[in-house]
Amino acid sequence: MTIIAPSVLSADFYDLKTQIEELNKSEAKWIHYDVMDGHFVPNLSFGPDILKQIGKHTDRVLDVHIMVSNPLKVVDYFSGCPVDYMTFHKEAVDDNVLIPTIEKCRLKGWKVGISIKPGTRPESLIGVLELVDMVLVMSVEPGFGGQSFMPSALDKLDWLDNYRKQHKLNYLLEIDGGINRETGKLAVEHHCDVLVAGSYVFKYPEGIVEGVKSLL
Ligand code: DX5
Ligand code: ZN
């Protein structure tokens, strides 16, 4: 069964309480939380304090996506936060920092994801794929909600699915950016397990609960 992970980046921040209550009523099993540092991506979002508040009011899996230049340091800001998955970007770190970042997350008790931007090939993750619980394929340039889906992400899902089967690995495949009913269906056809959807779910005319349902 496909997991839906609505991205609260597109929520109505003035009424976050109601938005989380709607997610709690929905079939979304996860909540996606985008952290942006104004350096790795040209935007700023939120940090650990809002995540703590959300965690107090939901039992959903909290899926944190950090779009930051220094994940090895930033993950420490989330110590004590209700993180289930912590996903950082391959492009943000030198190769010799990849494994220490993964290990630091594990010591905090989190599952770990690695993400690639549209210009990064999945082959560049060889050597890391054995160590992660999830691979997040970006289907837009990270930084903003509401952009159009890039179909080049689909080949990457195929490659990553093939690799996990060949090597008997269990990482989940997640896609993020421009997901709606059509692109979500395509991603699932290409072996995706987790669909992140921001603007589609939060701006769905019949509301969040129906928006999530329409992706299943
Ligand atoms: C973009 C973020 C996404 C964003 C997706 O950098 O990582 O999670 O919220 O938004 P939509 O679904 O509107 O493309
Ligand atoms: Zn994201």
Image: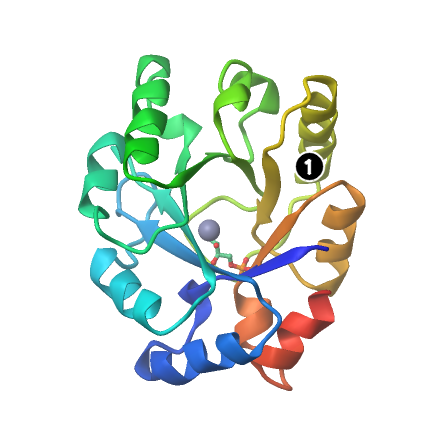
Q: Is residue 155 left or right of residue 11?
A: right
User: In this rendering, does residue 18 appear at all?
Assistant: yes
Expressed as whole percent of the image width and height from the top left, the position of residue 80 reads: 22, 51
Q: As drawn, is 166 to the left or to the right of 111?
A: right
- Residue underneath mark 1: 152
Image height of 203 relative to 37, above or below: below
Q: Quadrant of the C terminus?
A: bottom right
User: At x 41% / y 85%, what residue is drawn?
Assistant: 18
What residue is rendered at 62% in x and 40% in y? Answer: 173
Residue shown at 55%/46% (left/top)? 140
Q: What is the count of numbered marks?
A: 1
Disc 1, SS? helix
Q: Residue at x 68, y 36 (%)?
A: 152
Coloring basis for residues? rainbow
- Classify 10 Å Cα crowding around label 1: few (below 14), some (14-19), many (20 and above): few
Disc 1 residue type?
Answer: Ser
Q: Where does the image place residue 31, in percent across and percent down from the top left?
A: 47, 61
Residue 183 horizontal/vertical position (percent): 72, 55
**Is residue 139 visible in this depiction of the protein?**
no
Q: Nearer the viewer, residue 139 or 112?
A: 112
Residue 209, picture quadrant: bottom right
Residue 111: quarter of image: top left
Lateral position of residue 34 relative to residue 154, left or right:
left
Given residues 214 and 142, the one toward you in this image is: 214
Counting from the top left corner in percent of width and height, residue 109 is at 33, 40
Query: Vertically, is 216 above or below 210?
Result: above
| Outermost residue toward the right in this view | 189
In which quadrant is the N terminus drawn? bottom right
